[in-house]
Image (tube, helix red, strand yellow):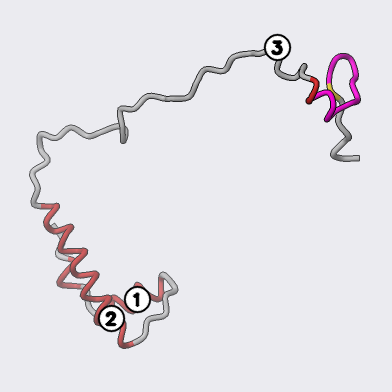
Amino acid sequence: MYNFYMILDKKHLEHLAALSRIELHKDEEDKLLADLRKILDHFKELEEVNTKNVPPISGGTALKNVMREDEVREDRLKSDKAVEQFPDQEHGFLKVPPVFE
């Protein structure tokens, strides 16, 4: 177990800010340092939890796919509205203007 709380000081905070390209003002440093220490304290609490008999999970949920199966519908493009929007036809297909010339 590594004690991050003890090594986190203003020098390390400035280094982390430089790595993440965050400009910190002097009045923000104390608050941010206190916040980071609180976050690290939460990790310290988690290290104390006994997870020896807890199996690892392989996914986040047991939900199944709720999408419907694809089905071919022959009448889908044979409506009059589709033919009106694409009046040109060739070999039974609707013909559209070329995208690239």
- 1 versus 19 height, above or below: above
The kind of residue on which mark 2 rests is Lys
Residue position for label 1: 15
Q: Is residue 78 highlighted in magenta? A: no
Q: Nearer the viewer, residue 36 or 63?
A: 63
- The image position of residue 10, as x and y in percent, is 26, 81
The kind of residue on which mark 1 rests is His
Q: Nearer the viewer, residue 66 or 21?
A: 66
- The image position of residue 97, as x and y in percent, is 88, 34
Residue 75, quarter of the rendered image: top right
Q: Is residue 82 left or right of residue 12?
A: right
Q: Is residue 87 highlighted in magenta? A: yes
Whole-number angstrom distance, CA of label 2 to CA of label 3: 69 Å
Q: Nearer the viewer, residue 84 or 19?
A: 84
What span is in magenta?
82-93
> Residue at left 70%, top 11%?
74
Residue 4, quarter of the rendered image: bottom left
Query: Are the residues tagged 1 and 2 within 8 Å (C-beta)?
Result: yes
Q: Is residue 61 left or right of residue 19?
A: left
Query: Are the residues tagged 1 and 3 within 8 Å (C-beta)?
Result: no
Residue position for label 3: 74
Residue position for label 2: 11
Query: Are the residues tagged 2 and 3 within 8 Å (C-beta)?
Result: no
Q: Earlier in the sequence, mark 1 or mark 3?
A: 1
> Residue at left 29%, top 32%?
58
- The image position of residue 31, as x and y in percent, is 25, 79
Indicate the secondary structure of the residue bearing disc 1. Answer: helix
Indicate the secondary structure of the residue bearing disc 2. Answer: helix
